[in-house]
Image (tube, rainbow, N blue to C red):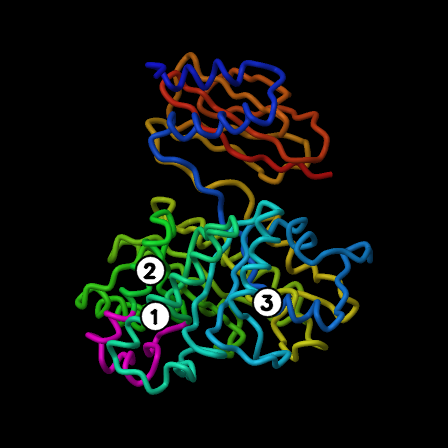
Amino acid sequence: MHENKGQLMADILHTKHLNRFTIIWIFIFAGFASSHTHAQFVNGADIGWLSQMEATGYKFHDSTGLQKNCLQILSDKGINTVRLRVWVNPSGDKINGHCSKNEVVAMAIRAKALGMRIMIDFHYSDSWADPGKQNKPAEWATHTFDQLLTDVYNHTFEVLDTLKRSGVIPQWIQVGNEITMGMLWPDGSTGNWPKLAQLLNKGYDAAKATDSSIKVVIHIDQGNDNGRFRFFFDQAANYGVRYDIIGLSYYPYWLGTDYTVSINELAFNMNDMTARYGKPVMVVETGGDYLQVQNTYNMLAAVIERVKAVPGNQGLGVIYWEPQGEKSWSGYQLSCWNSDGIPTAALDAFKAHGTGFTGATCGAEFRFYPNPCNSGILNFEFNSMTAGSIVRIFSIDGRLMGLYKPDGPKDAVKLNLLPGIYLVETFTGSYSIMEKLVVTN
């Protein structure tokens, strides 16, 4: 093993022409060289309706009107993650059915082929589960509590094992959906925390038995309500619930007020959750009125920025619920799609505000902005630097596009780059970090 991993990284990146296998090794060594690896910010879309929309013949179009695969349109809009709900034995109803194991696996394979990451949302029901309803699957309705524990474990493991054998390992799963009042009522209600904790831990254990890298999310609603979250997660701590991430829903539309009324409450709650329980947070559901395009854009941008601002890089990302679920098909008001099959401009908030990677805590922190950049002036900032600090910009295929030696802790350079995605690497003599830069027109 090379003794100076940072120097090794710099030596590798000094090569002007790199093949795709070398690019893979760049990311591996970047992880070694930094004291904390970077994680791509989650720009997510819950697309549970997509299979049945396609099955009914719904056609999707990009912003130019060209008919396209919906997943490709979402990817072009900056979406890098999809969330897929799974029901136990769903009906064939257009709106309230589907989302079976087989449909979820098929969609996950398609999303992975586009380079997207996957979250699986286990409802543990045959249809919708949320704070107002957590109905047992019909097949489990008469089971004893001990049988329910086995049901949760077996169902979770079966879905995840099928995904794994199909070449997809989800990055995250949810054990339950919006379980503010518990799940699998009445056994697993929050009126019976000892049993609820056991059920949640069975889901956790099944995920880790499938693959230890899978992160488990516990998700409740009204992410701006700190008292609601403290009450729930205090109980989870008291009863030994095992999980990795706190998931939040945030819908100003359903709160009946503009997002400006509650966005700071959301920020406070997320910051408090990470400080109080030592867990990262993710907004796993949000959305705004598709007719109020600018307001929904502003809301989404504000949510993204508040999540990115959670201290210690503990804000992992934001997932929009059913952006493609256009109202004429779904009856749902909070999509990001017009009646002509074209996404609204509200979805552009992901590319404008959700690009890049979460920062790493290192010996000397580095940032650059704006990102995305219009190929104008790019600003570099070092909290501390050495005489050997350098910044390199590479094309996605590994060609060196620029090398800069900053004159001080703050510097700026004129970019002359075509629109596209680039890799920015900084080397300070003791560590190396690589991040994504998006250059627009």
> What residue sits 33% from the left and 66% below the top?
153
- The x, y position of residue 133, in whole percent, is 42, 83
Q: For the residues carrying marks 2 and 3, which lies nearer the camera in this image?
A: 2
Instruction: Please name the residue that numbered disc 2 is placed on.
Output: 206
Tell me the kind of residue under disc 2.
Answer: Ala
Count neighbours of disc 1 (C-alpha within 10 A) and say few if under 14, some if 14 to 19, many if 20 or more: many
The one of 220 and 129 positioned closer to us in this rendering: 129
Can you tell which mark lies on residue 138? none
Disc 1 vs disc 2: Cβ atoms closer than 8 Å?
A: yes
Give how far apart the Cα atoms at labels 2 and 3 are.
Answer: 27 Å
Magenta segment range? Answer: 178-199
Q: Could you tell which of marks 3 and 1 lies nearer the N-terminus?
A: 1
Q: Could you tell which of marks 1 and 2 lies nearer the N-terminus?
A: 1
Above or below, 11 against 221 in this view is above
Tell me the kind of residue under disc 1.
Answer: Val
The one of 432 and 329 positioned closer to us in this rendering: 329
145 left or right of 220 in image: left
Q: Could you tell which of marks 2 and 3 lies nearer the N-terminus?
A: 2
Instruction: Please name the residue that numbered disc 3 is placed on.
Output: 322
Can you tell which mark lies on residue 152? 1
316 left or right of 61 in image: left
Count of marks overlaid on the render: 3
> What residue sits 40% from the left and 63% below the top?
174
Count neighbours of disc 2 (C-alpha within 10 A) and say few if under 14, some if 14 to 19, many if 20 or more: many
Tell me the kind of residue under disc 3.
Answer: Glu
Above or below, 319 against 384 in this view is below
400 left or right of 36 in image: right
Disc 3 vs disc 1: Cβ atoms closer than 8 Å?
A: no
